[in-house]
């Protein structure tokens, strides 16, 4: 150290970050600092000298907190089994619908019920007969296995709120300080678990606040059950003034362009139909949010006759779409004939089995894989993972696997110029397995430009991939030895390219070791050094891809897909963490500063609802994405680039995220500016999260990029 600056040789940096290939596979904690607390049981102090391992308040969570009763023949399906999220479970979303689970989680604490939670009921307590419309709504949520309802309160659903709080077995209520964050949480939960969660929004005003969350879930093809208070539509039932300014006609119009379906049932008897269809539509691939507006008066209406519930096994989503057999035959023939095939995967990884299928297909063919990371499609350290290379540009066949917008990969543009051009070599064939026109919106062209493809197979990759594998295997079985040798050589070339790609990224890490402000690769390496010793999950952001480049993200459940962009990440991360709550996993969010500032109050949710989450701030004290755009503009126009920071820098005053987090009862450290101090701080925070079940934040001051 010189003058407080860390001077580190690149080789030391690599050593410190344990990113040399040999070390990446080792389980040994070479050179790892051990925390004092482990050695002598003493309580380490946090940055302010306060006790780090503060005893929790007496809010003991009983062992059976997450206990589930399965109805009838209801075997646990999907990644959540016995309240435990299985990282390697096979989540066939399409099969979820038939097996509703009944929540019986008792949450008895020494002080009585936790705030915002349903009053516990014993296993033997039968559910009393519903008395009001809102009781029926809650029973419908229970019956379809909805475990959590996120909401910000509002009088338009005071009836529903009362039933949620008092009805036995009701889903756990997650109080959220902004409706958009409530929807983000349900979105993240669905991504991580494959299960539907509900968000309840106050009429009109809550819906408008929640709309961006709904839009984001729509873009990300994530099922969310959005419920809303409405009306009363009967004007004679309205309270003066407030009911009038909050009630709009056809309220769903505000979100209809980016929901898959909506409804506003106008009788209690119509509720089961509406809920059954909402569930089926939301979960049918391509999945997405649905919206049910629930009339306030209807919720509060007494029930005068029993309501028949759906047979959930018979009203669920239909079976997924299989590819046309002749098309599949053509595709397998073209793939086997190709010299340089490339597989480009987008949403295929929503099915955890896809990682294995894609890896196997790549190995059989000697094909490279490019992962656009909408979902995790292949282990980042798989030897044929060529994401980040230019392999698409030399391909003679590109196969798209459930990619919503192929222009992400097939086109490119020079940043200042608003014109896209093809990345493909002349004559390159394009084949596509995906939902194609079934995911086209007239309102937003989020499936990108309508690019030509030589073979477009409309199908769910969850069905098509194993079928394709079978056909490719059959064809390769009779491949002549000469052709097989060529394929082996191609595979070996790709493996070498993969290794060189990753070695290049490690060199970049080494070149930026010890930088102040701390470099993103250094931060990614420091977090990896901590998380890899845990059973871990990365929520959304990837630190500008550095986590993908340096970490071994090797199991489907490790990462539900990349960040959706600004003002989405903290909410989605909370939802992911909620899905893993109670598993002991270390759920980590690599959190950009600008994104958190939009939704700072989201931090309250984690401490209020005991959601363990490690937030590591990628704090470049800027909306840097836009700063970069302003630099481009200045360069193009010849204006002063020194003025590009105006309106995009967050440096003055620099937000103090650790203080912000502490105000919400988080463990927090920072701002950390010394690169040598980062890893230890993250390790301390990780222990708080895993051992105490508390949320923790480490604020790291970083370089812009
Ligand atoms: C709701 C919304 N508002 C504004 C933007 C425009 N925008 C895109 S990236 C970005 C900067 C985000 O800053 P930060 O999260 O700190 O990430 P950084 O670019 O600094 O890495 C902004 C403001 C957006 N995408 N969405
Ligand atoms: Mg930033």
Image (cartoon, helix red, strand yellow):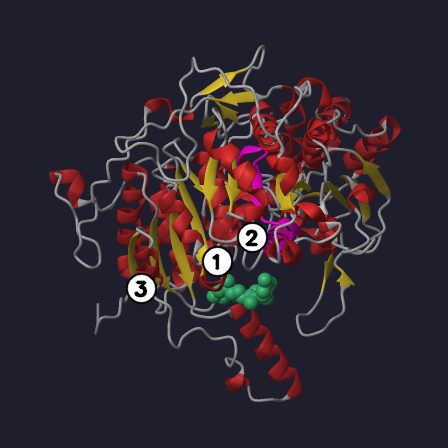
Which residue position holds label 2? 180
Taking the image as four quarters, which one is ligand 1 found in? bottom right
Residue 664 against residue 98 in the figure, above or below: below
Label 3 element class = strand
Image depth: mark 3 or mark 2 in front: 2
Residue extent of the magenta highlight = 190-215
Residue 214 is one of the magenta-drawn residues: yes
The disc placed on residue 599 is 1
Cα distance between the residues tagged 3 and 1:
19 Å
Label 3 CA crowd tier, 10 Å (few <14, some 14–19, many 20+): many
Label 2 CA crowd tier, 10 Å (few <14, some 14–19, many 20+): many
Residue at point 51%, 19% (across, down): 128
Quarter residue 63 falls in: top left
Cα distance between the residues tagged 2 and 1:
9 Å
Which residue position holds label 3? 671
**Residue closer to the observer: 158 or 354:** 158
Residue at point 64%, 40% (across, down): 297
Residue at point 63%, 26% (across, down): 303
Mark 2 residue's CB less than 8 Å from ligand 1: no
């Amino acid at each position: 150290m010189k003058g407080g600056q860390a001077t580190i040789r690149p080789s030391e940096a690599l050593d410190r970050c344990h990113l040399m290939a040999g070390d990446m596979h080792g389980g040994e904690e070479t050179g790892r600092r051990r925390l004092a607390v482990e050695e002598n049981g003493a309580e380490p102090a946090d940055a302010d000298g306060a006790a780090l391992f503060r005893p929790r308040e007496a809010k003991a969570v009983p062992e059976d907190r997450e206990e589930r009763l399965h109805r009838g023949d209801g075997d646990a399906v999907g990644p959540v089994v016995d309240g435990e999220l299985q990282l390697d479970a096979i989540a066939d979303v399409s099969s979820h619908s038939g097996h509703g689970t009944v929540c019986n989680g008792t949450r008895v604490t020494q002080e009585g019920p936790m705030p915002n939670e349903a009053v516990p009921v014993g296993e033997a307590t039968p559910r009393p007969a519903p008395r009001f419309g809102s009781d029926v709504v809650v029973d419908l949520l229970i019956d379809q296995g909805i475990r959590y309802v996120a909401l910000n309160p509002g009088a338009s659903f005071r009836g529903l709120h009362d039933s949620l709080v008092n009805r036995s077995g009701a889903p756990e209520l997650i109080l959220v300080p902004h409706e958009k964050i409530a929807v983000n949480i349900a979105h993240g939960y669905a991504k991580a678990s494959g299960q539907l969660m509900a968000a309840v929004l106050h009429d009109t005003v809550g819906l408008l606040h929640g709309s961006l969350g709904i839009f984001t879930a729509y873009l990300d093809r994530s099922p969310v059950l959005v419920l809303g208070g409405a009306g009363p539509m009967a004007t004679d039932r309205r309270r003066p003034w407030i009911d009038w300014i909050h009630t709009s006609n056809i309220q769903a119009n505000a979100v209809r362009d980016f929901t898959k379906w909506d409804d506003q049932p106008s009788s209690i008897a119509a509720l089961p139909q509406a809920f059954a269809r909402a569930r089926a539509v939301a979960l049918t691939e391509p999945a997405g949010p649905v919206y049910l507006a629930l009339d306030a008066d209807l919720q509060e209406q007494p029930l005068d006759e029993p309501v028949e519930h759906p047979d959930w096994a018979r009203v669920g989503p239909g079976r997924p779409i299989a590819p046309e057999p002749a098309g599949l035959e053509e595709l397998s023939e073209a793939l086997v004939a190709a010299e340089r095939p490339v597989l480009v995967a987008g949403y295929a990884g929503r099915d955890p089995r896809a990682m294995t299928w894609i890896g196997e297909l790549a190995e059989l063919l000697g094909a490279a894989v490019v992962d656009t990371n909408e979902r995790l499609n292949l282990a980042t350290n798989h030897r044929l993972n060529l994401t980040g290379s230019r392999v698409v540009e030399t391909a003679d066949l590109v196969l798209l696997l459930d990619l919503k917008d192929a222009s992400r990969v097939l086109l490119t543009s020079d940043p200042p110029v608003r014109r896209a051009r093809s990345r493909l070599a002349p004559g390159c064939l394009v084949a596509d397995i995906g939902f194609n026109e079934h995911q086209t919106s007239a309102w937003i062209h989020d499936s990108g430009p309508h690019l030509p493809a030589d073979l477009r197979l409309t199908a769910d990759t969850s069905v098509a991939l194993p079928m394709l594998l079978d056909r490719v295997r059959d064809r390769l079985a009779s491949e002549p030895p000469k052709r097989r040798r060529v394929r082996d050589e191609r595979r070996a070339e790709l493996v070498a390219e993969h290794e060189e790609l990753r070695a290049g990224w490690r060199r970049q890490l080494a070149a930026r070791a010890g930088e102040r402000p701390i470099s993103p690769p250094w931060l990614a390496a420091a977090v990896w050094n901590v998380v890899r010793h845990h059973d871990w999950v990365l929520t959304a952001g990837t630190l500008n891809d550095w986590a993908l480049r340096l970490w071994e993200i090797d199991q489907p459940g490790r990462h539900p897909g990349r960040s959706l962009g600004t003002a989405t990440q903290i909410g989605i991360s909370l939802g992911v963490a909620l899905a893993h709550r109670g598993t002991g996993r270390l759920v980590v969010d690599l959190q950009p500063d600008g994104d958190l500032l939009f939704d700072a109050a989201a931090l309250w949710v984690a401490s209020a609802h005991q959601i363990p989450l490690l937030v590591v701030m990628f704090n470049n004290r800027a909306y840097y994405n836009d700063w970069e755009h302003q630099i481009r503009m200045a360069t193009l126009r010849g204006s002063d680039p020194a003025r590009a920071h105006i309106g995009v820098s967050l440096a003055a005053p620099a937000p103090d995220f650790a203080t912000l987090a502490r105000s919400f009862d988080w463990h927090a450290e920072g701002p950390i500016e010394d690169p040598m101090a980062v890893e230890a701080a993250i390790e301390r925070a990780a222990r708080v999260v895993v051992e105490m079940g508390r949320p923790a934040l480490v604020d790291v001051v970083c370089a812009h990029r």
